[in-house]
Image (cartoon, helix red, strand yellow):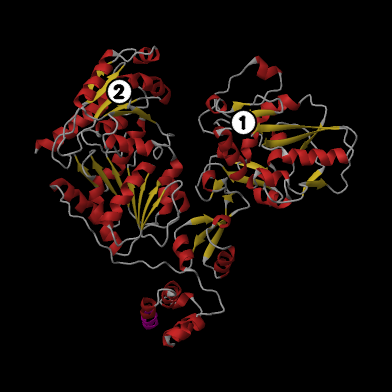
Amino acid sequence: MRIADKVMNIADKSSRIADKVMNIADKSSRIADIPMNIADKSTEIADKPQNERSNAMKYKGWLLPPALRDFHEGRIWLKEHAPFQMEDIEKAIHHKYFHIIEGIQKEPHLRCNRCHNDDPQQFTTFDCSKCQQPCVYCRHCLNMGRVSSCTQLMTWTGPRAIRTRKHALKWAGQFTVLQEQAANEMLESVKAQRSHLIHAVCGAGKTELLFPTVHYALEQGLRVCIATPRTDVVLELYPRFQAVFPQTVIHALYGGSPKQEGYAQLVLATTHQLYRFERAFDVMIVDEADAFPYTFDETLQSAVQKAKAENAPILVVTATPSHKLLTQYQQESYSFIPKRYHNRPLPVPRFHSLWNYEKSLKRGKIPRKLKQWTEERLARKEPFLLFFPKVELMKIATPLFQQLDGSIMAVHAEDPERKEKVLKLRQEEVPGLLTTTILERGITIKNVQVAVIGAESTIFTSSALIQIAGRVGRNADFADGDVVFFHHGITIEMDDARTKILNYNKKGFSQ
Amino acid sequence: MNKMETLCLLCSQPLQSVISWKLLLTKQFQPTICERCSAKFEYSSTASAFYQYNDAMKDYLHQYKFLQDVALAKVFRQKLYARFKHEKATIIPIPMHPLKLRERTFSHMEELLKAAHIPFIQLLEKTTAETQSSKNREQRIQAAPLFRLMDGAHVEHKEYLLFDDIKTTGTTLQHATELLLKAGAKNVKSFTLING
């Protein structure tokens, strides 16, 4: 460690070569991994006066670029797609810093070694001009660069990245009694390396609950991942975590995310991005674990297992756990928060019949009750969200609502201006939005009022309806609001959602 | 490549296969994309191409050529089969440079024809690995010869049909046409999947 200390001193003086020297420092603290002459070199450098140092740095051998190590640690990556020079990659392979596996595993059955997809329907065989023989590729994770039988995947086995134990927690908020209890229970679980389910109603302050646990884990030098099925949630969490952990390198990974520098000890990612990790994380947190497509796509669930270290605990956070999740965790460890942080009950949805609404909209007429409700919101200047079961129906309805107020807009999943439109609602530039279920979770708008049109549709499951109702009354100053389910017949799912909400309120306010 | 698709190749929604007399009695390929996805492609008004270039086509080409999703060769097989089954001219797909071919691992034009069970031959060889899409209009028109004849290629005095994916300025097709005519072809036609 003495060598390392000396070199560190120089690193402070000269920022130009700091990176390279850091690399040596790191290496020399792990002497077992490297030939002695590199360690010797670093003493030499330390002894030389400053002006001769550039000469001494002309080491003829190959030095591992720290960026390469920082990027690849914990990742499983296509060799051809590595964001570094091929020369460095080859050298690293030569030093046995990479473990190489074939892209597609053929025995005992076809499996993609990146996304673990093994559905034969998702593979295609073709005559490959590169390997000159029939080649199989995986269509399931095609968007991340094609994995085929003649491509190779690399995992890092070289020297480990430098992890720091210095992490500030800059958060001045106060926990409620229930939050405090749940946060402590979760922390205990992580200390005992035990998986944990946090079941907290919408607006209970789930994100804040994570802060003490994440901080503890980072200070232990552990690598933490917060994964969620929704890109919107990653985008919302990222700035919040950056503000709360100002000293920590945090990366946000989602489809199309920009390249980010350094080694992130805290990673916020969509569950899709976890296909690209292997045994990387010591603590795995899954937020909104019941959201589409996570529950629907089994490879995403196996990706979470694959991306974490073998005995790393999984912390699941959700407002609407599935029955399976509940039974799975109830024996292990489970925290439940039935109350919102501002100590007011959850708004209970009203049911309102809206017979033949689809027909009426297609005929170019907004049903009377719905029109009344919308006009009332406009008159009171309350922002509102109207949830539609189908994009097609929403597109038919949009011009009709725009007759009531020209600035009403519609958003759906493929809308490129989705973020801007939600922002406009938040800044009160538009009175209300028509939306599909994409806005069912993760958004907080002050004093928002909500109506579901066609609540009997199969897409509105009980958990979707609970999430939708959970948009209302999240702000302490506007803790109440209207949630109305307009329907063409009441379904079991609607009843279930209402019963659960009533139940939470009963549990939260009985003591 | 010959398996039945149960999900749309473009949007992964389940495909509904409808059994019909037409399907049983004539040569019909199973559909590979759903009606919603196929409705996004816009037909071309010209006779020398099927489609007009639009966003859906841009996404298709990106997934097929850039993400190397060979399975997408099947998307247009029914249309290609119908267009070419009575074709008298000999079909020549526009070739790729060997380096590009290794890089992409398949020839996208040949795969389209193979998927539609259309016979074709190859007489041409690409001289440059540069892509047309990286050049502007001026550079394209002034480009040095893009093709040469393959070693031992024999151009007969008959009609040929060149097949390419997209026609923007027409330079690629013009180069190939001139070369074939000079080598003794009687007539050279061309057809593209997309009009740019």
Q: Is residue A10 visible?
A: yes
Left or right: A71 as drawn, with respect to A408:
right
Q: Quadrant of residue A402?
A: top left
Residue A378 rendering spot, x and y as whole percentages: 24, 24
Q: Secondary structure at mark 1?
A: loop
**Residue shown at 27%/13% (left/top)?**
A368
Residue A187, relative to residue A164: is it above or below? above
Q: Which mark is residue B4?
A: 1
Q: Nearer the viewer, residue B134 or A83?
A: B134
Task: Identify the main secondary structure in magenta.
Answer: helix
Please give the chain letter of the residue carrying mark 1.
B
Residue A463 rendering spot, x and y as whole percentages: 30, 32
Q: Nearer the viewer, residue A197 or A442?
A: A442
Residue type for callout 1: Met
Residue type for callout 2: Asp
Q: Secondary structure at mark 2?
A: loop
Left or right: A496 as drawn, with respect to A399:
left
Please give the chain letter of the residue carrying mark 2.
A
Mark 2 lies on residue: A405
Q: Nearer the viewer, residue A54 or B89?
A: A54
Q: Does A197 appear in magenta?
A: no
- Boundaries of the magenta span: A1-7
Q: Which mark is residue B52?
A: none
Residue A113 rendering spot, x and y as whole percentages: 53, 51
Picture quarter with the C terminus of chain A: top left
Picture quarter with the N terminus of chain A: bottom left
Q: CA distance from mark 1 to mark 2?
A: 49 Å
